[in-house]
Image: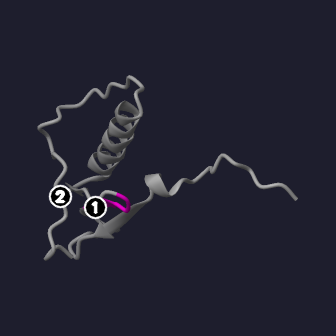
Amino acid sequence: MTLDRHVCHAIGRSYVVKLHRDACAHESQLIGRLESMTSGVHYDFHSGAELLACLIRELAQASTAQGRNSTVAMDPANNPPQQKNQGDV
């Protein structure tokens, strides 16, 4: 057996999705926080579209950090990332 040197699900792309207590499946209210496991940066979201936008923004920033050009059609001032504070849950 040989191990693949290219990991499909790298730890650098691991996230935690924390759903807000007011999130409600039957009303399609998706509210919560997306947090990067490696950097601790988190984004608050209020819909499925915002959650996906946060993930796309994270992928774009990772691509840029690795020297690849990547553009995202979104206003960066809309829901900017926040650094994790000691008191954040």
Residue 22 lies left or right of residue 52; in this view the side is: left
Q: Position of residue 24 (x, y in %)?
A: 28, 70
Residue under numbered circle 2: 83
The three-letter code of the residue at mark 1 reads Gly
Instruction: Give the quarter of the image for residue 69.
Output: top left
Picture quarter with the N terminus = bottom right
Q: Earlier in the sequence, mark 1 or mark 2?
A: 1
69 up-or-down from 30: above or below: above
Residue that appears at 45% across and 53% down: 12
Q: Which residues are magenta?
A: 33-38
**Residue nearest the observer in this picture, 52 or 82:** 82
**Residue nearest the observer in this picture, 12 or 79:** 12
Picture quarter with the C terminus = bottom left
Q: Secondary structure at mark 2?
A: loop
1 up-or-down from 80: above or below: below
The three-letter code of the residue at mark 2 reads Gln
Residue under numbered circle 1: 40
Instruction: Give the quarter of the image for residue 25.
Output: bottom left
* Residue 35 belongs to the span the image colors magenta: yes
Disc on res. 52: none
**Residue nearest the observer in this picture, 79 or 61:** 61
Residue that sits furthest to the right in the current view: 1
Residue that appears at 17% across and 32% down: 75
Residue 2 lies left or right of residue 57; in this view the side is: right
Task: Kindly report the distance in space between the C-alpha atoms of the residues bearing marks 1 and 2.
Answer: 7 Å
* Residue 27 belongs to the span the image colors magenta: no
Near mark 1 (Cα within 10 A), the count class, few <14, some 14-19 or many ≥20, is some
Residue 32 lies left or right of residue 60; in this view the side is: left
Residue that appears at 17% across and 73% down: 88
Visible residue check, residue 59: yes
28 up-or-down from 87: above or below: above
Residue that appears at 37% across and 62% down: 37
